[in-house]
Image (spheres, rainbow, N blue to C red):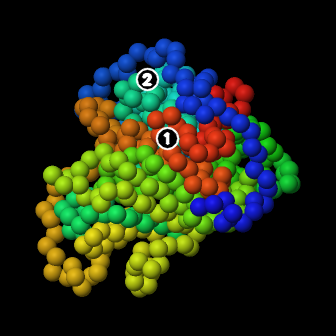
Amino acid sequence: MSRNNFPPSRRALPRRQFFTTLGAATAGIALTGCFSPRPRKISANEKLNIGFIGVAGQAGFSIKNLKDQNIVALCDVDANNLAKAAQQFPSAKTHRDFRRLIDQDGIDAIVIATPDHTHAVATAAALRTGRHVYCEKPLTHTVSEARFITDLAKKTGLVTQIGTQIHAGNNYRRVVELVHSGAIGKVSEVHVWANSSYGGKPRPTATPPVPDNLDWDLWLGPAAFRPYHSDYVPFKWRDWWTFGGGSLADFGCHYMDLPFWALGLSHPVSVEPIAGPAVDAESTPPWLIVRFEFHKFQIAHGSLPYTAGPLKLTWYHGGKRPEELVPDALYAKYKGGVLFVGDKGQLISDYSKHTLLPEVKFADFKRPAESIPNSIGHHKEWVRAIKEGGTPSCHFGYSGPLTETALLGNVAYRVRQKLEWDSASLRAKNCPAADEFIQHHYRKGWKI
């Protein structure tokens, strides 16, 4: 789409020139230096020693699912959150600065549940010191970080898992089996929508005092300094490009996980903003439509592929959806979801349910036999792989490209043009200006 199809930006986007090759662009965060010795061998009957970087919000879900292991370290920049978690695990050491947790001896694995802008720096530090990592989604804040962390995890050989826990549910497995069975024929389109909206706000100008319980400088971490405001923390940071990526970064890895799995997707060849509000240099878009195109697929089912050549995947959020493709009555049931469009039918799914369309055609459909084993649990997959070997289903080798794809949608929107994507060199071949949003920029002292 031409940039002229978008409303003018509320603030002019800066247009500095950045390096356009992966080797040059990642200078200073290259895979150099020595790694620590291999992590200790742990038997199936032993407990992992786990540290948590971030203990509130989504971290609570991970704590609940891992409390049968040894929780030996807790870290949070909010003293109130830290004190509450410490009551639950009184023998765990507590830290305000995650770098001090990294320094603590006797930790086998680390869970990272911070805002997006600190995912990569914490994950890199954990991997470099020989710790297995579970990181919440999206894996990183920027595309370049996602590639860096994916490569670092591969080099270390440690066990990793991203927090797309919906992947472990039975529903996604049954949907993948249906797609692989050929029930809807060859898929040419996928539509993905989230009933979510962040952003669309002016940057606050007031400078209230920092709450006594919050270490604001540590919360900012690698982000450039700005005065504290309650519009950033807690829980509102997804509204701002500096800290998050809005609805696409939040829910993209959950919903796009299903077509990535079912269709063997990896890196797109193009990303195009279809519609959205005026681009704001500070705040994420409250609604957006972006289209990705894929030409290469990692897997095929049996002797025939289940995709019809190039595949288009369209993302919607903020109340937008593929209205013409689904009966209106279904949208009450599928407020967020994934729609596979095949040459023999359609398949709509959300996290917990799915429907073959048109329903009358599939009324007597005989489902394929279950072929994908049910998960033992998203966190349990990670723990078992650490103790017994193997690879969790959402390791960074899988979830890195998934994260890159979601974040590229935001990049295309911010430059307001279609990107011809060269995944090998990590650049948009037709848009040097995109480098500003592809490459990460760190506050002094925080580069990974």
Secondary structure, mark 1, is strand
Quadrant position of residue 99: top right
Q: Looking at the image, is mark 2 or mark 1 nearer the viewer? A: 1
Look at the image and tell me in which quarter the N terminus lies: bottom right
- Residues at marks 2 and 1, CA–CA distance in whole angstroms: 32 Å
The residue at 67%/59% (across/down) is: 3
193 sits left or right of 205 in the view: left
The residue at 56%/50% (across/down) is: 419
The residue at 23%/67% (across/down) is: 185
The residue type indicated by label 1 comes to Asp
From the viewer's side, name the closer residue of 209 and 165: 165
- The label shown at residue 422 is 1
Per the image, the residue denoted by label 2 is: 130
Above or below residue 120? Residue 177 is: below
Provide residue 95's location: percent of width, then percent of height: 60, 32
The residue at 71%/36% (across/down) is: 17
